[in-house]
Structure formats: structure tokens, C-alpha cells
Image: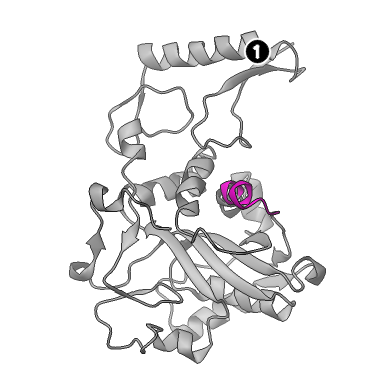
Amino acid sequence: MFWRWDFPTGSNSALDEPRIADSRRHGAGGLRGAAGNLAAFLLNTVIPGECNWCKGAIRHARRIPYCDECLALPQPLHAEHYCSRCRNPFQNDATLDARGVCLRCRSGLPGFDYVYSFGFFDGVLRSMVHDLKYSRVSPLGGYLGELMARAIPLDLAVDAIVPVPIHWTRWINRGYNQAELLARPLARRLQIPILSPLRRKRTTKSQVSLTVSERRKNLAGAFSIRDRSLVADKRVLLVDDVLTTGATIGYCSRLLRDAGARSVTVVTLARVDRRPSPARVVLTASQASGGTS
């Protein structure tokens, strides 16, 4: 028999305490689980870990390298002027029509119906995303997924969730698709399945510094539909971690539409604020207490 720490990924809470499991997995787990929780708590009490953001002591018994205070720091995004469809923030309403729709969405180019994001890609939220993607801190997926779920309207009607896929080489290196980890709390909340109709055919470089034509070339042939029947006549919720230029979610949305999806709504954990920095507005904790739904 061997012992290991077993951190649940399918529970309702993104911040669950670990449980102890042996090689039989479902043996006398009650007493051992309680003992494991106590052992983890005592270990962090005697030899506390260091928070990745504030560098303070971590006193909880979770595999999330942030203290409770820093876990509470991410706030919903807010902007005075933004597109009512893609939620892109603007310095003013000069480019918005009477319905609050921006020029790009009016052109019909994006392919999606609506976009929702929890927060701006900066500060502690940026640090958490980097840890999830590049440091293999997979337990952050549940916590960040719960934050992302706050971004969508309470009355949103969708039939299935589709995470933006990563290339198989990155999956082998990382061990998971971060978009799928973020999607799991949404699937539990909405009680709908997570489907994989999209396939990532090749890796792509970052879109941030590319021109419009370079972005098209970068994404050309990067994704394909593996099974059209999975999304035919369905209202799809497309999930990704960060919205930078919107090119990736637009490309995937058009593929899903071409495969027969009735509608495509996008939700991301964070989005890059591309306005000049003086125009950025961050909600205070008191303003954000009501959530974004």
C-alpha cells in the first residue's frame, strides 16, 4: 500500500481541502481523510508556504500558492464605455452605435454572438493565470473557473461548453488544458456537458504584436472541427483563459458556426485592456461585492 495526497477536482467548491487516499482509493477513507486534512493544516501551520503574490505566509491546507487575502483580490472588470456584444472597453462612445455595438461587431467578422470576461489581465489575476498555464498549478483551475462563472448572465441559455483546445505537444508538457479546467465549474453550475468538437492542428505564436493580416496567417489552419454532430443546432458556450485580440475566439466561433452551431457565446477568465492606461478603471472591493451577473 502507498499513500499520496489526493486533491479533488470535481467537487462543488474550488477551494476544497485535500483528502488522503491510498492505492485502494475507496478504503476506510473517512478517518484517514480527516487525519490527512489535519496533517496538512498542521504542516502549513508549522512550516507555512509563501504566497506567490504578497510573499506572506500561507496557512490553509490547499495546493494553491496564494494566501486567503490574495485569493480575494481579483475584481470584476469595469469600463464606462464598452461594446454591448464583445464587451471590448473603449475610451469613449464615438465608435459605438445607438445599440452600443462597436464597428468590428457590426461588420459581422467576429463570428460569436456575445463575449463575457471576469476581469482585466493584470495584477494578481495575471499572476494566477501564468501559474495555471506555465507552472502546472492545476488546483487554481477550479478557483479561477468559479470567478469566470460570475461573468456570465444568470439567465444565459446554452446547451454545451466547448473549451478552446491546445496542441497535443503543449498538453503533454502541461498535463491538462487550462480552458477545460476553467470550464468545469461552469458545467456544474449550468448542468451541461463539456464537449470537444474542436481540434488544435498546430501551435501558434502570440497574437499580441501581430498585424491583422499576420493574425489571419498565424491562425490559418490552426484549428479544425473533429465532429460536427457534437455542436449541430446547439447553443455553444466557448471557453478560453485570456482574450487578447479576439482573433482566436473569432476563428473558433466561425468554425463552430460552420459546423451548425445555433449560437456561440464566449466567456474568458480575463481580457487584455488595450486602451491607454489612464482610461483603465478598476472596481473597488465595495463596488464589486455584488458580482457581475
SS at circle 1: helix
Instruction: Describe residue 137's horizontal placement relative to residue 163 as left or right.
Output: left
Instruction: Describe residue 8's horizontal placement relative to residue 260 as left or right.
Output: left
Q: Position of residue 245 (x, y in %)?
A: 44, 73
Q: Pick the residue in front: 118 or 207.
A: 118
Residue 254 belongs to the span the image colors magenta: no
Q: Quadrant of residue 279?
A: bottom left
Q: Residue furthest left?
A: 278
Q: Pick the residue in front: 5 or 149.
A: 149
Magenta stretch secondary structure, dominant: helix
Q: Quadrant of residue 100?
A: bottom left
Would you say residue 221 is visible in this rendering? no
- Report the quarter where the N terminus lies: top right
Residue 185 belongs to the span the image colors magenta: yes
Q: Residue at x 64, y 72 (%)?
A: 222
Q: Residue at x 43, y 77 (%)?
A: 210
Q: Position of residue 79 (x, y in %)?
A: 29, 68
Q: Pick the residue in front: 156 or 246.
A: 156
Q: Residue furthest front?
A: 155
- Report the quarter where the C terminus lies: bottom left
- The amino acid sitting under disc 1 is Gly
| Mark 1 surroundings within 10 Å by alpha-carbon count, few (fewer than 14), some (14 through 19), many (20 or more) | few
Magenta stretch in the rendered image: 184-193
The residue that disc 1 covers is 30
Would you say residue 259 is visible in this rendering? yes
Coloring applied to the structure: one colour
Q: Residue at x 52, y 25 (%)?
A: 17
Q: Position of residue 171 (x, y in %)?
A: 64, 50
Q: Position of residue 143 (x, y in %)?
A: 48, 41
